[in-house]
Image: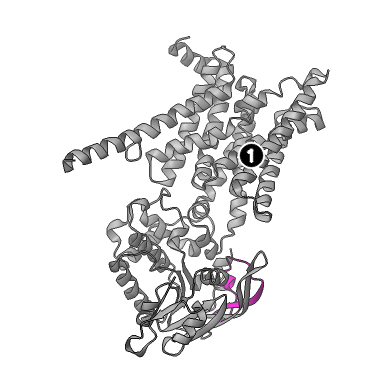
Amino acid sequence: MNPAELLHQLFFDYTVRTVALGTGILGIVSGALGAFAVLRRQSLLGDAMSHAALPGVVGAFMLTGSKAPATLLLGAAISGLAGTLFMIAITRYTRIKEDAALGIILSVFFGFGLMLLTFLQQNPNARQAGLNTFLFGQAATLLASDVRTMAVLGGGAVALMLVFWKEFKLLSFDRDFGGSLGYPMQGLEILLTGLLVVAIVIGLQAVGVVLMSAMVVAPAAAARQWTNALGKMVGLAAVFGAVSGITGAVLSSTGAGLSTGPVIVLCASVIVAISLLFAPNRGLVWNGLRSRRGRSETGI
Amino acid sequence: MPCLEKPVENNLLPLSVADLTVAYQDKPVLWDIDLDVPSGILMAIVGPNGAGKTTLLKAALGLVPMAAGTVRIFGAPYRRQRRLVGYVPQRGSVDWDFPTSVLDVVTMGSYGSLGWVRRPRRREQEAAMDALVKVGMQDYAHRQISQLSGGQQQRTFLARALVQDAQLYFMDEPFQGVDATTEWAIVTLLKELRSQGRTVVVVHHDLQSVPEYFDWVMLLNVRRVASGPVEEVFTEENLRRTYGGRISTLGLNGRARAQAGS
């Protein structure tokens, strides 16, 4: 299929349009909130959160027998948050450091989720079919009602981020100073982490638990290359996220049977690669040229 | 928001600490500290590494939980007096590659008086510019903070504290790793704050410059060894008790000029 046909599909095919709208929204939300996660050096927290969401998805189905997105996402949010809280408790109350705690939570929760999933699949009950799309994502399964849910939750998360912009900036840059001014930094941290959970959860259906953290980290890392202002970085990360989401959804809908998650993440990776190489001031090519020019000027 | 409550300014001591004990996981970092700081002085807190100097500041600012004791700022708990207090954290405690400009960092000094959600406007930005002029950084207002030298970073933090327009300042190692120009600029600034009747408490590392820069000193090593006017308490004997004999005295001008040996 050539690019013109793809574009035509994007605008005129109802399914593709719905899917692209959904993945675009998830890209905006995960890009914007991912920027704060990256700046706070919590990229891996997103990874642990999204993997920890799997047992929640499967568990919610087992308890309710329903595959309604709202039910599954609520399960995902609860177990993702539980994983995060366990992790914080482990680092605070034991001698285990943060990276090890992340590894423990990620593998334990994800392993438990996989176990539940395989247990269900051995059951003769066929109603569980489709749950395993939560592993790698299947944007084609997005319905207009799912996209509405994503828009409401994601829009709310971004709106809260904008309302508490000043406070979140303080938290990310100088937590102690913020505390000395009287802002409840721990409360703000929990709120920002909660918003990140929302960003991750709304992406699970389309991108999957395995790769969703890439949508948190990649757009933000790429955006950091192009700007030195927090506002621009968050905006650019949202744009990069949306572009990856829409492009990936359209490409995977060409019918080659590709899972949407990996294609979206590959699109984001291309943006990261370009940004790492060519961004002015911070890009590798730019730095290479500058040091070469410096050498030739000094005659070395 | 607590920091919008009206603070009470009065003739009471700017800082009064009684029986303060702080512990990290059963290990005491500060033990039974009593300290009264009178108004309008520059006070240094000195002591070896791990003596609890930074923790003392953080406890006074309510940033670390106290196991016991009380802290009073102008006679009332800190949470009611925040607006009277300015804070300069250690320069190394933040990520200087954070995507923001010098002016933006300095404007953060107004966040306490702004309160929840309200954004800084022209008035706050002008206050930040004024503060940058006072520390000689006005030409760097729009620089990305990663492009600053250590001394410039420190002056940025000081400017942010000036925006707070506080009566009592806590500064954590403002002289750490700065160039001579910045050191001189900071000393001038401290003296100006004192001449306006403000009180400054500084965690300090360089024992040599204590008599030159400060009026009061506190010698701290988990417990308070001594505190008071520099002439009275900055003695060889007290320094030895603080640093445990690892002191080589220079004995210049009859004053105990000393340097911590390693």
Q: Is residue A276 left or right of residue B12?
A: left
Give the residue type at disc 1. Answer: Met
Q: Is residue A276 left or right of residue B72?
A: left
Q: Is residue B83 left or right of residue B101?
A: right
Element type at mark 1: helix
Tell me the magenta residue range.
B61-80
Is B93 or B80 nearer to us in this picture? B93
Is A201 or A116 nearer to us in this picture? A116
At 53% across and 69% down in the image, what residue appears? B50
Q: Position of residue B19 (x, y in %)?
A: 63, 80
Is B80 or A41 nearer to us in this picture? A41
Q: Position of residue B132 (x, y in %)?
A: 33, 63
At 69% across and 34% down in the image, what residue appears? A110
Q: Position of residue B44 (x, y in %)?
A: 44, 78
Tell me the colour scheme of the image.
Answer: one colour
Residue position for label 1 = A49
Q: Position of residue B92 (x, y in %)?
A: 44, 59
